[in-house]
C-alpha cells in the first residue's frame, strides 16, 4: 500500500495557501461573531465523549482541506489495514492489534486466545478481591507496564474495592520501592510483576528487591504472593512465579492496559467493570472504523494536531483534566504520544522535513491554574489546551463540582476572549508602585486571547467512558503519526540509553573511565569520590 507523504499532497499545498490567507490571522472572537452556528458546526458526538472543537483556530475551509489531506494520504485504507491485522509495525515485523483485546467474544482476530486469557485473568482478579487475606496489591512495572494501570486505578476509584490498597513501583530508584515496602505486611500483599519482555532492567531489579524483602520478612509462599503479566511466561517461571497471565507481541507496551497488564485494574474494579472498560474502548474503535471522517473524533483531533504543529508551529499541547481521578492522564499520554510519534524518520527510513510529536504535558484542573496557566494566558508561546470536564461527579458535593466546572469553562473562555488594554484601563487599578504609570500597569493585565482549546465532555467518569476516552487518544495518535508517515508503534529511541546504562554500570563499580567523554568521566569520578 503506497500513499504520498503528507507534505507531497495537493491538499498540503492548499493548506499552505489557506494558512497564509486565513490561518495565520484567524481570530476566534470574530469567527464566533460571524457564525452563530459555530459551536454546533464544530461539535463531535462520539461514543461517551462529546468534543467541542469550536474554540480552535479552524474554519470550515480548514476542515475541508484537512479532510482532503487525510483522504489523499489514504488514511481510511491504512486504518482498515491496521484494524485487519496487517503488519503495520514494519520495523518490528508485527501487526498492531490492541483493538482485538477489546473486541467482543467472536468478533475480533485472535478471539480465542484473547478471551481465554481475559477470562482467566478476571477469574483470578475476583479471587483476590474475595480473599480477605489480601490488603495490598503492588504492581512492579515501568512505561506501558505501569502508566496505564497507574492512571486507571485512581480514575475509577468510585468503583474500586474498598479493602484493597494499590501501589505502583516503577523507578529503579530505591526511593520508589522502599517507602512502599515499609508499609506492607508480606502475609497480606500480592506483588504483580508486569513486564511485556520480562527483561526490563528497572522491573527485574525491583522484582528482585520485592522477592528478597518478602523472603526476609518470613514470607514463603511465592506462588500465592507473586503473579506476573508478560509475553515471556518462561522468564517469569524462571524467576519463580507460577501464576502468569500472558499476552502477545502484537500488543505494544503503551497500548497494553487492555491486556493482562490491566490485572491491577481488574483487581481494583472487578471483572464486570473491567469488561465495561473494554466495551467503552470497543465502542470508540467502532466509531474510529466506521464514522465518516468529518464526524470521526480521533481523526479530527489528529488532523488538528497536524494543523497546529506543521502550520501554526505550536510545539506543545497541554492537557487539563478537570477531574482529580485523571491526575495521571497527562503522564500516560506523554508515553502514548511522545513514544509513538516522537520520531524524525519516516517509515521508509528517510528523514522528515516536518515537525512531529508536540510536547504533551499537564496537571489536573484547578491545580494547574495556580501554577503554569499564567504562561498559557500571557506567555509568548501559544499552547493549545485540551480541557476534560465530567458532568456528573462520583461524590455528593454539588457545590465543589459546580465550582470545578465553572473554572473549567472560565479557563477556555479566558484563553479565547482575552482582555484588551481598554478593558484593563477601565478596571479599578490596583494600588501600584508610583514608578509605573497607569498604561504600563494596564498592559500587564491584558490578555491577548485568541488562544485555542478543545473541551472534551464526559457524562460521568465510568469504566465505559474512560475506556472510550483512552481509545480515542490511541487512535488520534495513530492519525497524526500516519499523516507524518511514521511507524507509531516502535520505540528505538529508548534503546541507546539502555545500552549505555548497562555499559556504565560496571564502570561505576570499578571507576574505569577510559575512553569516556570528558563530562561523563568527570561526573562518574565525582559520584565515586568519598564524601567530603
Ligand atoms: O521504555 C521503553 C519500553 O520498551 C516501553 O515501550 C515499555 O512500555 C517499557 O519499556 C516497559 O517494557 P516491558 O513491559 O517489557 O518491561
Image (tube, rainbow, N blue to C red):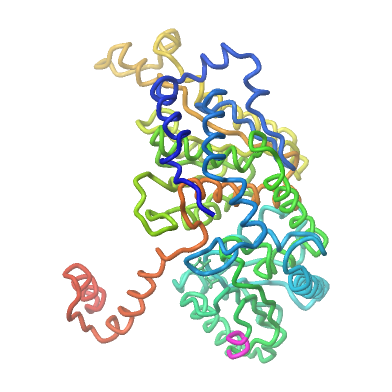
Q: Position of residue 290 (x, y in %)?
A: 72, 44
Query: Measuring 53% from the left and 34% from the top, which residue is drawn there?
Result: 66
Q: Position of residue 267 (x, y in %)?
A: 74, 67
The residue lying furthest to the front in this view is 2
Q: Quadrant of residue 420?
A: top left
Query: Measuring 40% from the left and 29% from the top, which residue is drawn there?
Result: 16
Query: Measuring 40% from the left and 16% from the top, which residue is drawn there?
Result: 430
Q: Is residue 467 magenta?
A: no
Q: Position of residue 13 (x, y in %)?
A: 42, 32
In this orientation, which residue lies closer to the viewer: 330 or 56?
Answer: 56
Judge from the rendering whether residue 275 lies leftward or rightward of residue 401; answer left or right.
Answer: right
The residue segment tinted magenta is 234-238
In this orientation, which residue lies closer to the viewer: 177 or 481?
Answer: 481
Compared with 317, 146 (above or below) is below
Q: Quadrant of the N terminus?
A: bottom right
Query: Measuring 43% from the left and 32% from the top, which residue is drawn there?
Result: 374
Amino acid at each position: 500500500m503506497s500513499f504520498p507523504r503528507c507534505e507531497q499532497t495537493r491538499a498540503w499545498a492548499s493548506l499552505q495557501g489557506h494558512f497564509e490567507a486565513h490561518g495565520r490571522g484567524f481570530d476566534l472572537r470574530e469567527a464566533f461573531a460571524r457564525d452563530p452556528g459555530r459551536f454546533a458546526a464544530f461539535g463531535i458526538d462520539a461514543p461517551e465523549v462529546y468534543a467541542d472543537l469550536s474554540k480552535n483556530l479552524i474554519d470550515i475551509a480548514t476542515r475541508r482541506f484537512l479532510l482532503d489531506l487525510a483522504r489523499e494520504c489514504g488514511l481510511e485504507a491504512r486504518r482498515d489495514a491496521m484494524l485487519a491485522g496487517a503488519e503495520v509495525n514494519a520495523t518490528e515485523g508485527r501487526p498492531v492489534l490492541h483493538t482485538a483485546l477489546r473486541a467482543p467474544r467472536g468478533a475480533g482476530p485472535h478471539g480465542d486466545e484473547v478471551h481465554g486469557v481475559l477470562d482467566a485473568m478476571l477469574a483470578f482478579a475476583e479471587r483476590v478481591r474475595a480473599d480477605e487475606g489480601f490488603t495490598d496489591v503492588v504492581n512492579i512495572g515501568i512505561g506501558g507496564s505501569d502508566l496505564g494501570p497507574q492512571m486507571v486505578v485512581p480514575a475509577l476509584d468510585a468503583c474500586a474495592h474498598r479493602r484493597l490498597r494499590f501501589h505502583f513501583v516503577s523507578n529503579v530508584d530505591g526511593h520508589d520501592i522502599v517507602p512502599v515496602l515499609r508499609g506492607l505486611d508480606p502475609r497480606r500483599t500480592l506483588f504483580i510483576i508486569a513486564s511485556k519482555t520480562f527483561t526490563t532492567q528497572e522491573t527485574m531489579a525491583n522484582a528482585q528487591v520485592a522477592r528478597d524483602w518478602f523472603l526476609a520478612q518470613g514470607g514463603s509462599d511465592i506462588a500465592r504472593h507473586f503473579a506476573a503479566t508478560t509475553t515471556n511466561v518462561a522468564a517469569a517461571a524462571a524467576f519463580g512465579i507460577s501464576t502468569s497471565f500472558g499476552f502477545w507481541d502484537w500488543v505494544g507496551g503503551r497500548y497494553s492496559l487492555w491486556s493482562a497488564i490491566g490485572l491491577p485494574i481488574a483487581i481494583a474494579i472487578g471483572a464486570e467493570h473491567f469488561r465495561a472498560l473494554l466495551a467503552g474502548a470497543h465502542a470508540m474503535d467502532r466509531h474510529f472504523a466506521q464514522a465518516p471522517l468529518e464526524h470521526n473524533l480521533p481523526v479530527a483531533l489528529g488532523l488538528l494536531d497536524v494543523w497546529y504543529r506543521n502550520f501554526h508551529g505550536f510545539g506543545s499541547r497541554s492537557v487539563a483534566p478537570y477531574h482529580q481521578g485523571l491526575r495521571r492522564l497527562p503522564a500516560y499520554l506523554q508515553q502514548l504520544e511522545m513514544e509513538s510519534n516522537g520520531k524524525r524518520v519516516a517509515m521508509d527510513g528517510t528523514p522528515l522535513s516536518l515537525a512531529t510529536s508536540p510536547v504533551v504535558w499537564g496537571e489536573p484542573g484547578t491545580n494547574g491554574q495556580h501554577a503554569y496557566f499564567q504562561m498559557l494566558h500571557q506567555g509568548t508561546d501559544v499552547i493549545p489546551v485540551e480541557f476534560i470536564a465530567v458532568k456528573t461527579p462520583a461524590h455528593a458535593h454539588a457545590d465543589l463540582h459546580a465550582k470545578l466546572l465553572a473554572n473549567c469553562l472560565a479557563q477556555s473562555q479566558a484563553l479565547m476572549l482575552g482582555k484588551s488594554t481598554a478593558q484593563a484601563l477601565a478596571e479599578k487599578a490596583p494600588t501600584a508602585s508610583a514608578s509605573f504609570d497607569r498604561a504600563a500597569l494596564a498592559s500587564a493585565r491584558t490578555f491577548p486571547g485568541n488562544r485555542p482549546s478543545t473541551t472534551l465532555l464526559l457524562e460521568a467518569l465510568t469504566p465505559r467512558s474512560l475506556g472510550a476516552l483512552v481509545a480515542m487518544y490511541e487512535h488520534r495518535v495513530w492519525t497524526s503519526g500516519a499523516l507524518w508517515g511514521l511507524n507509531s508503534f516502535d520505540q528505538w529511541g529508548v534503546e541507546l540509553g539502555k545500552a549505555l546504562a548497562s555499559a556504565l554500570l560496571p564502570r561505576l563499580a570499578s571507576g574505569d573511565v577510559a575512553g569516556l567523554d570528558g563530562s561523563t568521566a568527570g561526573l562518574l569520578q565525582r559520584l565515586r569520590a568519598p564524601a567530603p
